[in-house]
Image: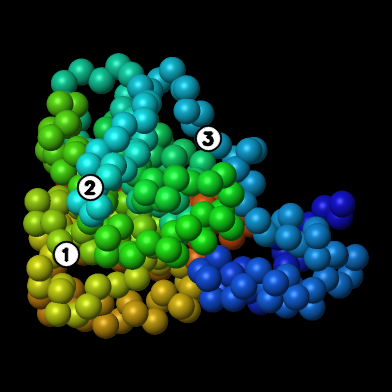
Amino acid sequence: MTKIKKEQISQEVFDLYDQYAHNKIERRDFVQKLSAYAVGGLTVTSLLSFIMPNYQDKIQIVSDDNRLKTSTIEYKSPKGGGTIKAQLSKPANAKGKLPGIVVVHENRGLNPHIADVGRRAALAGFVSISPDALTPLGGYPGNDDDGRTLQSQRDRNEMLEDFIAAFETLQNHPDCNGNIGVVGFCFGGWISNMMAVRVPELKAAVPFYGGQPADEDVVKIKAALLLHYAGLDQRVNEGWPAYEAALKNNNKDYTAYIYPDVNHGFHNDTTPRFDEKAAKLAWERTIGFFNQKLG
């Protein structure tokens, strides 16, 4: 198969993948439109292989890393009387209670990458909970295509309640000191913004390229905000000016960064949208922010 380099791929391919990944176009249409860029020795098969996530080779912290204590827990879902499964992770050598972080997945359930991010947060000195909002439908199905299909069958406000319940689970956990933040990506970024609106006890929220709350809800935010946006992400960024104006008008504690010339999903190191420099900087800022606000 042809070895593809990132610089060979036009921005239109990344934009097309963004539409597909966010259920704006069906897979058949995505593949058909992708064929227009299968030129110069590139094939549709090689383009698909290049653009899709590679979880197997990109995990940074394995689930049985001996520096951590990582397990699967269940907590009650506020909707339907069922339970939600979540990864719980903390440093193995932790002494005393730790601040907590809720890690919120994208629009496809708790895939291997987001579980990895949850472990990264734990390795940084926190107790992290990474829920799978697909639990009522059987959980993350093992691939993102089916994960997106399943997640589209759930109401996003009901999923918000499930992540708020994860916050409450950490609040009552014997390993957590009650100082809790949230970090989320894409759909999880919207959840992070909305948890800031809905949960007055939340200390800090870090949405990565997340949709914004309604202007009238901004007044309810008590948490400090650290917001990360991708410079090329027109879809999400169009809501930022109004959000920033509302944050300013209501004197909210926020810091925002727009990383130039990177795509939506730039923090996700399993796809070619990943930008190593921006991702490293954004994560360093995130951990520093949590240390400051939750310490």
Residue 12 versus residue 52: which sits nearer the camera? 52
**Mark 3 element type:** loop
Disc tally is 3
**Mark 2 element type:** loop
Residue at position x 63%, y 38% from top? 56
Q: Quadrant of the C terminus?
A: top left
Specify the label residue 60 is tagged with.
3
Circle 1 Cα neighbour tier, 10 Å, few/some/many (<14 / 14–19 / ≥20): some
Specify the label residue 197 is tagged with.
1
Residue at position x 44%, y 45% from top? 139
Residue at position x 60%, y 43% from top? 55
Residue 176 is left or right of residue 1, and the answer is left
Q: Is residue 243 above or below residue 167?
A: below
**Marks 1 and 2, the one that precedes in the sequence:** 2
Residue at position x 36%, y 58% from top? 188
> What percent of the width, then of the height, locates residue 111?
49, 45
The image quadrant of residue 35 is: bottom right
Q: Amino acid at mark 1?
A: Val
Circle 2 Cα neighbour tier, 10 Å, few/some/many (<14 / 14–19 / ≥20): few
Alpha carbon distance from label 1 to label 2: 24 Å
Q: Can the viewer see residue 208?
A: no
Residue 210 versus residue 240: which sits nearer the camera? 210
Specify the label residue 81 is tagged with.
2
